[in-house]
Image: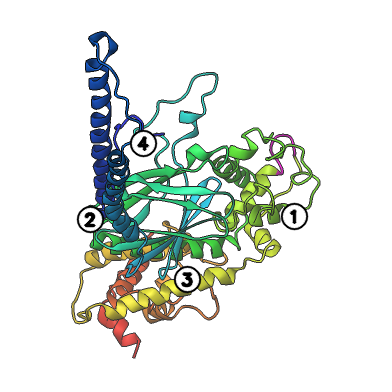
Amino acid sequence: MAWADKQLNLTKGVTDISQEVYGLHMFALYICTAIGVVVFGAMFWSIMFHRKSKGVKPATFHESTKVEILWTVIPIVILIGMAVPATKTLVSMENNDNSDITIQVTGSQWKWHYKYFDQDIEFYSVLSTPRGQYENQNGVGETKGENYLLEVDRHLVIPVNKKIRFLITSDDVIHSWWVPDFAVKQDANPGFINEAWAIVPEPGIYRGQCAELCGKDHGFMPIVVEVKSEEDYARWIDEQNELIANAAAAEAASLNASLSKEELMQLGETTYTAYCAACHQPTGLGLPPAFPALKGSPVATTGSVADHIDIVFNGKAGTGMQGYGKQLSMKEIAAVVTYERNAWGNDTGDTVQAADVKSATSGSASSAATTVEKVVEKVSKAVSAAPAEDLSKEYTLDELMAKGEKVYNTACVACHQSTGAGLPPAFPSLIGSPITTGDVNAHIDMVVNGSKKNPSMAAFGAQLSKTDIAAVITFERNAWGNNTGDVVQPADIAASAK
């Protein structure tokens, strides 16, 4: 294991429970050591001083009631002395009452899926160590990184000094979620839920691994938990909500986009290498019979595109082929299907767009809209709880432009692009557009209330403060060569709402 080169003793850990477990371990070790010293000491002393060469004659007794009682009672007392504190600790380890945050941990071949209850945040955490570091080609591999096989693309983030309840399960085979610093090691069984908890008193990054042999890539399922201060954790939650909204908007935009075959093949190869190559191999030859070849296969050549999309999106029951509908965007699924149907000599000529994935699956743009609505609701609650704005304050053009650029890059860039060029026709260009160069009040209304003609344009009146809206409108009217010179203040936004 990766911990073998660190220490010989049990990991002491950082949580109170891990300290108790370590204390029990040392307590039992000291008792066993003392028993060993007494038993072997008596044995060696007897051998040395009662040997035949010294003329010692052996005793002739056969039974002793006192000895029988002693060697029965003493071990019982020792075991009770060890069992009482161990039982208290075990009871504490199983007590999930009064938890502050609940996170579902799902093992999958070969990654971890985390879902935050009451937050609508979920994501997959995948090994990020480059393949070149652990797949030696011709005996030559890349130099191993600092956290070799122990780094992931997305950390599980929790706040400090809060009781975190983990619900641990699996969607395929038996895994085991193990973080030594927390004294947490629970099997992830399909169809069952095991529980664990942790209160971490110190911010930092803590690493673990899957501790159950779960298949060919068992060694590539690391766990990374990042513990943040309460303030940093709150900011992280806000960042995740923004990412969800941006991803939902980008997903909706992709349904109206049409990529060239070259663009699809390039994105498809990247996606295939990251998610599919471990089983089906970079050459597409697979690892039969568990992972069949895609090169020349009926699925990727003669089969229908809709069936191909379905198996990538939903997986195939009873096999190692899992569904990627929750892991990949429709754009990525379209790209990887296009790649598989045209790589390794398959050459079907088929190109698949995100809209094709939507029509071939049960997914729809409404799911993206629902996600956005949830984020809007959350942000609305946060805004309503925030201190009242000073609507009388006047900002300079430079102040509004600086703030507006930040707001734009958070709330608008996914659809209208950092250059303002948009993604026509769903998300029109803002460069020289009638909205950004025409009537200011119409521009304000569009941002605050959205567009009835174009449902893709969401209303931001409940998401952003009046200062943020004033800043982003000022930015849009003066960026990318628009240069209208208009300066919009928070009071203007408030006036438009009356």
Task: Compute the Cα span from label 2 to label 4.
Answer: 23 Å
Q: Is residue 344 magenta?
A: yes
Q: Which residue is mark 2?
A: 201
User: What mark, if any, has residue 147 been given in the picture?
Assistant: 4
Which residue has dot 3 on it? 372
Q: Which residues are magenta?
A: 341-346
Q: Secondary structure at mark 2?
A: loop
Place residue 309 in its image quadrant.
bottom right
Q: Nearer the viewer, mark 4 or mark 1?
A: 4
Q: Report the amino acid beneath label 1.
A: Asp
- Residue type, mark 2 in image: Pro
Locate residue 23 relative to residue 429 in the image: left or right.
left
The part of the image, by quadrant, that contains residue 432 is bottom left
Residue extending furthest toward the bottom? 498
Do the CB atoms of the residues marked 3 and 2 lie less than 8 Å apart?
no
Residue sitting nearer the eye, 489 or 195: 195
Front in this rendered view, residue 62 or 244: 62
